[in-house]
Amino acid sequence: MEINALKAGYGTAIANAEKKLAQLNPETVAARTGALWDGQDYIIPWFNELLPLSSGAVTEKILWLHYLTSEGTRPPVGVYAAYREMPGALFYEPAFNKRALNPLIKRFGGDPDSLMEAGIANGGRAADVGDVSVTLAPLPHLPVTYCIWRGDDETGHGGGILFDQTASGWLPAEDLAVLASAGVYRMMKYKKL
């Protein structure tokens, strides 16, 4: 796909989502999603920051707009679900593995304890999956848990990325892959080799 066509696709996605958002009551959207409405713009709780919707980079802005306009109404229930369990995820699983899971394992598999350090620095908390795991909250109702299993010379390292089972009510599978990737790269940026 050419760069111009890709940019046009992003522009169309943003325009469509902005149109849908403009038709919704801002106070209702804020109450449902955990975002803030300041009378002019939505303030998005993004990991451990509060960022205006208007300030988002293209991929962030698309995620945020899809989240704000989603039909999701359930807070997390605390039941883990693998990416492949999300509706439509099998189609995007190769991209999810390439952009999120493989970089997670490559960077933190040999040093699992650094996953916890990088996760906490990004507003995360310890989780109870794998040998080392941390849950980040990229968006208020969308926790993502990053796990590393310690390996040995024969088995190597392993890892996983888990969502709350309600995640697909907030974002489609393609967006969940981007969301998971955002967390991995934030942690990698914090904990560079």
Image (cartoon, grey):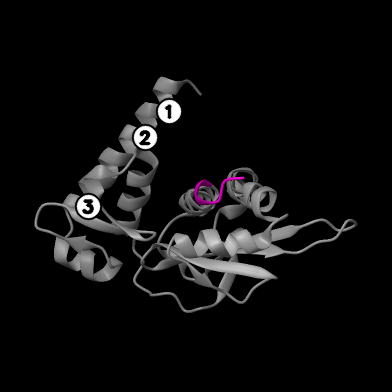
Q: Is residue 135 visible?
A: yes
- Location of residue 146 in the rendering, given as x and y in whole percent from the top left corner: 58, 62
Percent x, y for residue 18?
Answer: 23, 45
The CA distance from mark 1 to mark 2 is 6 Å
Asked if the magenta segment contains residue 75, the reply would be: no
Q: Are marks 1 and 2 in contact (CB under 8 Å)?
A: yes
Magenta span: helix, strand or loop, mainly? loop
Q: Which mark is residue 6?
A: 1
Residue placed most toward the observer, 167 or 191? 191
Left or right: 67, with 124 as reference point: left
Tell me if residue 190 is in the magenta stretch. Answer: yes
Residue sticking out furthest to the front: 193
Q: Are marks 2 and 3 in contact (CB under 8 Å)?
A: no
Say few, some or many: other residues with alpha carbon within 10 Å of mark 3 (under 14 / 14 to 19 / 20 or more): some
The span picked out in magenta is: 189-193
Q: Amino acid at mark 2?
A: Tyr
Horizontally, residue 34 falls left or right of residue 1, namely: left
Secondary structure, mark 3, is: helix
| Residue 188 in picture, x, y percent from top left | 55, 49
Q: Residue at x 46, y 61 (%)?
A: 121
Determine whether, in the image, residue 49 is placed left or right of residue 76: left
N-terminal of the two: label 2 or label 3?
Answer: 2
Q: Which residue carries the number 3 mark?
A: 21
Q: Residue at x 30, y 44 (%)?
A: 56
Q: Amino acid at mark 1?
A: Leu
At mark 1, the secondary structure is helix
As drawn, 6 above or below 141: above
The residue where tag 2 is placed is 10
